[in-house]
Image (cartoon, grey):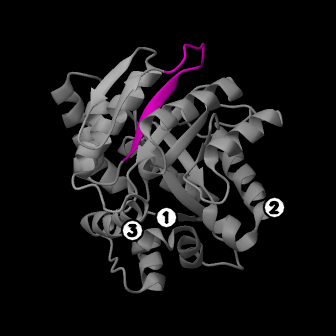
Amino acid sequence: MALSRAHALWQGQSTLIEPHQGFAYAAGAGFRSPVGFGVTLMPLRHPYEAALQARSVAMTTGHPVVAGFGPGPAVFQENMLGRPYPSQLTAIREYVTVVRGLLGGGAVDFRGEYFGYRGMLPPAVAPKVEIGLGVLRRGMAKLAGEVADVAVTWLTPASWLADTIVPALREGAQAAGRDMPRVAAMVPVALRRPDRTPAEQALASNAMHLQGPHYIDMLRKAGLAVTGQNTAADAAALVEGGAFVSGDLEQVLTGLKEFEQAGADEIILNLTGVYNLQGPDETTNELKSLLGALTGQKLR
């Protein structure tokens, strides 16, 4: 890894192995690096627990952490909490307020409509924990510009990032009188091989996302012909629209370069489709190929 441009390990929310525990296990096994959560879901834990877990990972790994949060789909919120958050953005703002206050090391005394806490984390020396927000659409991007350190995108085409997400981040940051958050673009990717098709890889990576109303809305606004009714056709639309990057090595590198040009400060390679269809060994080999090729690229 030291010979490539890779510098951090990211993990999305998982209900198989909880990501905080996964990173702690890896650290105990001797694999310690900066990590990011892109993203964990708010209904699963109170802001105090979220701050405690994020700082615990920073202390366990000895490296900085990006603690990314998102509300999750409305149906998930209802299943966990009995009802969705009536105001998604208000709930997120309050959640981040408590988490940031706790991670800042001082006492928190906050009561909001959805979240609140009075108290503090025990003092400790720990690597930096930054707050990230999962960002798909303009409203969330503007909020992230106001309150987050990092905006984490998933399945967003480079054109949507450039034309919608980055301007909204900048607008929110200017309104709050602060610097614009960094952009960490999680990009689902797979090299084209004779024994697989890009649409199959895209579907294996994003079948659940293609059923989410918030993802469907974002993708449609980005100009992709996604319906939410025909998953095979929708997966092909992801490839056609650049939300899923595929092709030979040169084509994939060109696709990743588009995300950098669109404003991504960090590009996170996600090979879930390869893993689900071809297994861990082929996924590892493919990641090595991509990282090896990126080493020679003139990127920022």
Q: Looking at the picture, how far across and down is residue 222, in whole percent?
A: 29, 63
- Circles 1, 2 touching at the beta carbon (< 8 Å): no
Tell me which amino acid carries mark 2: Asp
Q: Earlier in the sequence, mark 1 or mark 2?
A: 1
Q: Nearer the viewer, mark 3 or mark 2?
A: 2
Quadrant of residue 211 in the image?
bottom left
Asked if residue 166 shows in the view, the reply is no
Residue 228 lies in the magenta stretch: no
| Residue nearest the observer in this picture, 61 or 159 | 61
Residue pointed to by mark 2: 281
Q: Nearer the viewer, residue 55 or 277?
A: 55
Q: Is residue 34 left or right of residue 145?
A: right
Q: Is residue 42 left or right of residue 213?
A: right
Q: Residues within 10 Å of mark 3 (few under 14, many from 20)?
A: many
Per the image, the residue denoted by label 3 is 241
Name which residue lies at 35% across and 38% down. Answer: 95
Q: Is residue 243 above or below residue 134?
A: below
Q: Where residue 79 appears, x then y in whole percent?
A: 41, 65
Q: Residues within 10 Å of mark 1 (few under 14, many from 20)?
A: many
Report the amino acid beneath label 3. Answer: Gly
From the top left corner, tell me how far across and down residue 288 is, in percent: 74, 50
Q: Nearer the viewer, residue 188 or 65?
A: 65
Q: Amino acid at mark 1?
A: Phe
